[in-house]
Amino acid sequence: MDIDPNSRFLLKSFRKYYRENRPIMPERFSRREFGFMFFDRTFVQRHLGFKRPETLHSFLVNQVPSHSYYSTAYYRRPDAPTMDEKTWLGADLIFDLDADHLIGADKMSYSEMLEQIKKEMINLVDSFLLGDLGFSDKDISIVFSGGRGYHAHVPVESVISLGSAERREIVDYVTCSGMNIDFVFPFNLVPTSSSNFGGQVRTNIAKDRMIPPADSAGWRLRMRNGLFELTQDICAMEVKDLKRSYPALSKSQTKTLLKLKEEVSKNQKYMFEKNLMTLLSKGNQELLVRVMKEDVAIRLSGEVDEPVTADIKRLIRLPNSVHGKSGLRVTPLTRNALNDFDPLVDAVPAEYSDDPVKVTMKRDYRIRIKGEDLSLSGETEVPEFAAVFLIGRKAADHGYLSAKQQ
């Protein structure tokens, strides 16, 4: 088929990259299915298997895919033409975070999206994978997707046999879906008095909310710490700022919130020493619990793409391949390296040169890439590494369009 100038330019740049770089093979790669998309073909080619790394490298150099994937699953026959014939043997546990799922992503620049989604990945890894779920650093592989997000792979024996239902439960835990707030802040039932009516003794019970103790774990400890921060804000903030920061308070009257501030300020120390809300009015106890459930819990949760984690036959991007919509490298990372990782510096392949390339911008565009600040419009020249990114992101066309139209 005919190939347009943009695809031809990207194909040439990608081939230059693949000649110098071998893919990073996933564990037990001979049991994985591989799939590819191309610049010069409209179909997806999948159901492929590779017995040797050299064979896959040769395929990348000769075929130059725009996108390269491998299966999270292991199969007895990964190259079989149908899923039934493959025979599923297990699958890595995968977490996929993509910036397009972020609230307000449509108003962020590309670099702002990448910075925010990196923070979400750090929270997921530290709080949940290394924290609550108890995996170790060596159990987790972190990968920049080359596009707008990150993947966390957990290829350990204890999880590869999990089915979709069990993986959805992990997602529910991380995202705080279906939390029982009465489990987190249970009632402390204390008999206060008794009375006799016609020979029947009735006992009056005081019901006050309890706070998870400091030696709790998982979500109960997370919510204890969240409640402490909430009470700190209640003590320090003006009522109007509280309503803005905690929407669950927005319908409360000012006098109600002033009473809440007074009670919390007076009794906060007691609350967290005794792990009880006893000294607060019943109404204020329930107000705190409501704010924790509606506002705070979601802020403490992790970002996860549920369909990806639950899918036991998913294709995921191949590490050290390049992403067809950005030209950036699908980059494996350690947890420590993630802190300072800048995709627009560290994932820009060295094989893309500084040589000027003529492009026509589709819109005004500003980007800082590989240490260079670019403010672009119309027909212009940019370094090759920037041209690959801009054309891949469909922000520019290769060449000067006015020259082509003459």
Image (cartoon, helix red, strand yellow):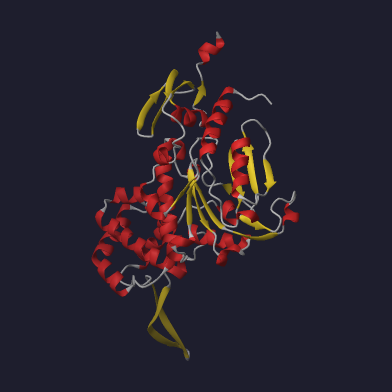
Q: Is residue 82 left or right of residue 167?
A: right
Work out whether 26 lies above or below 400: below
Q: Residue at x 45, y 27 (%)?
A: 384
Q: Is residue 12 left or right of residue 340?
A: right
| Corner quadrant of residue 233 | bottom left
Residue lying farthest top?
406
Residue 92 point in image, percent of width and height: 57, 58
Q: Look at the image and tell me in which quarter the N terminus lies.
A: top right
Task: Give residue 375's position: percent from left, percent from top.
Answer: 38, 25
Residue drawn where x is 51% and y is 12% of the image = 402
For the question of whether residue 312 can be seen, the reply is no
Q: As rendered, which of 243 and 340 lies closer to the eye? A: 340
Q: Is residue 237 above or below residue 105?
A: below
From the viewer's side, name the closer residue of 313 and 215.
313
Number of numbered markers: 0
Q: Residue furthest bottom?
A: 199
Q: Residue at (26%, 51%) from the top-left corner?
A: 238
Asked if one can make out residue 137 in the rendered structure from this viewpoint, the answer is yes
Give the position of the C terminus as an image quadrant: top right
Residue 95, position in %: x, y? 52, 54
Of all residues shown, which one is farthest toward the front? Answer: 54
Q: Position of residue 237 (x, y in %)?
A: 27, 52
Residue ID at (39%, 43%): 115
